[in-house]
Amino acid sequence: MQVLKIFVRKDNQAMVRCPFCAATKDFSVASFRGKSHSIKLRCACKRIFQVDLDFRRAYRKNTKLAGFYATLSVESASGIRQMQMYVDDLSLVGIGMTTVGPHGLRVGALLRVEFVLNDPKGTIIIKKATVKRLVGSRVGCEFLETREQDRELGFFLMP
């Protein structure tokens, strides 16, 4: 069975389109927040299909971009040393990355991340971020600032 991914809006509403008859419907998904994000729906056409609800604040794009990160101290904006990483997914508000080698990071650590978008300009993205999630070498971070380059990042993220 094909699984559809649905982005949930800030008002806890989601729009689903039936993959069989193309009928669309808006519905509340507030009762699923913090619970199961994968549900089965029955359309008016009587067909059943599965959807995964995405409650993220912003659209996230899967990528495979090489880059670097450095741990920052609270007192200084200069990184201690640059380490290699790969950007696995990216949004306007954060990054999912995989470190190359051991990282020694902890939740709350302050980072400087740098990577190049594979857009026609080869836009360089440099951002400060804080570590929000760690699972082995996989690190989830939230960006701490917005910049002029966010416009290029927004264009890159367009589906």
Image: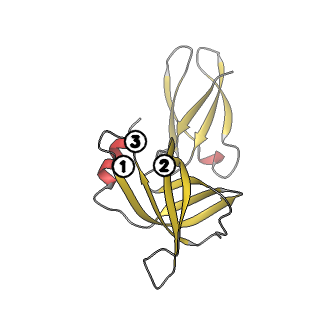
Q: Nearer the viewer, residue 61 or 14?
A: 61
Q: Amino acid at mark 2?
A: Leu
Q: Position of residue 121 (x, y in %)?
A: 29, 44
Can you tell which mark lies on residue 118?
3
Count residues near mark 3 (Cα–Cα under 10 Å), then give few for <14, some for 14-19, many for 20+: some
Q: Residues within 10 Å of mark 1 (few under 14, many from 20)?
A: some
In the rendered structure, which disc, 1 or 2, sits on the residue that comes first in sequence?
A: 2
- Relative to 131, say whether 76 is above or below: below
* Tag 2 near tag 3, CB within 8 Å: no
The colour scheme used to paint the residues is: secondary structure
Cβ atoms at labels 1 and 3 below 8 Å apart: no
Residue indicated by mark 1: 153
Q: Position of residue 79 (x, y in %)?
A: 48, 74
Could you tell which of marks 1 and 3 lies nearer the N-terminus? 3
Query: Is 81 above or below relative to 61?
Result: below
The quarter of the displayed image where residue 32 is located: top right
Query: Disc 2 marks which residue?
Result: 90
